[in-house]
Each structure stands twice: as structure tokens, then as C-alpha cells.
Image (cartoon, grey):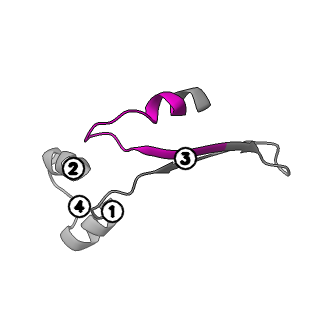
Amino acid sequence: MLDEFNLAKDLCHNNILQYKYFTSKIHERTKRCETHLILELIDGIEFDEYISKHGKPKDITIVKDIGY
């Protein structure tokens, strides 16, 4: 996963979140790998907040617009 992060961290485009930080370690108790990514903060509201204000979108175009 570090290789993917190293490739993606230098990408710069309006439609791509900027990668800020990556860490990976083995959890002592579970012996599973934990991976953490920190990405840039983007403006907007979360989808569940949109639904609570406006109801479920009836058209896929609206979902695409929200995702954009």
C-alpha cells in the first residue's frame, strides 16, 4: 500500500483529493495491519445530512452532482 500512496501523493488535479500522510503498523493484540491515510479536507455536507434535509434523491443525476 505504501507504493500506491507514494504514487498518489504527488498527483495534483481538481478531482483528486490530495494525500497528506500515510502510516501502517501491525496491531499488537490482533496482529492485523492497520493503515491510516490523512487526506485534504474538502468543503460540503455529508450525504446523510443532505438526505435528512432534502430526502432521498429520486434521480441518479442528483447523486452524481452531490458526488462531484
Rounded to the nearest angstrom, the CA distance separating label 1 from label 3 is: 23 Å
Q: Pinpoint residue 50: horizontal percent, then vertical percent.
A: 25, 66
Q: Residues within 10 Å of mark 2 (few under 14, many from 20)?
A: few
Nearest the eye: 52 or 11: 11
Q: Tag 3 or tag 2, which sits nearer the N-term? A: 3
Rounded to the nearest angstrom, the CA distance separating label 2 from label 1 is: 12 Å
Residue 56, compared with residue 40, is above or below; it is: below
Give the residue at x 33% y 64%.
48
Residue 2, compared with residue 58, is above or below; it is: above
Secondary structure at numbered mark 4: loop
Please name which of the two marks, 1 or 3, marks the residue nearer to the observer. 3
Going by the numbered disc 2, the residue's amino acid type is Val
Please name which of the two marks, 4 or 1, marks the residue nearer to the observer. 1
Q: Is residue 42 magenta?
A: no
Q: Pinpoint residue 23: horizontal percent, then vertical percent.
A: 64, 44
Q: Which residue in the structure is indicated by mark 3?
A: 21
Left or right? Give the position of 54 relative to 39.
Answer: left
Give the residue at x 25% y 48%.
67
Say which mark, if any, is on residue 56: 4
Say which mark, if any, is on residue 46: 1
Q: Tag 3 or tag 4, which sits nearer the N-term? A: 3
Task: Tell me where the magenta segment starts and ends, as one range.
Answer: 5-23
Q: Residues within 10 Å of mark 4 (few under 14, many from 20)?
A: few
Left or right? Give the position of 33 relative to 43.
Answer: right
Q: Are marks 4 and 2 in contact (CB under 8 Å)?
A: no
Q: Quadrant of residue 15?
A: top left
Going by the numbered disc 4, the residue's amino acid type is Lys
Secondary structure at numbered mark 1: loop
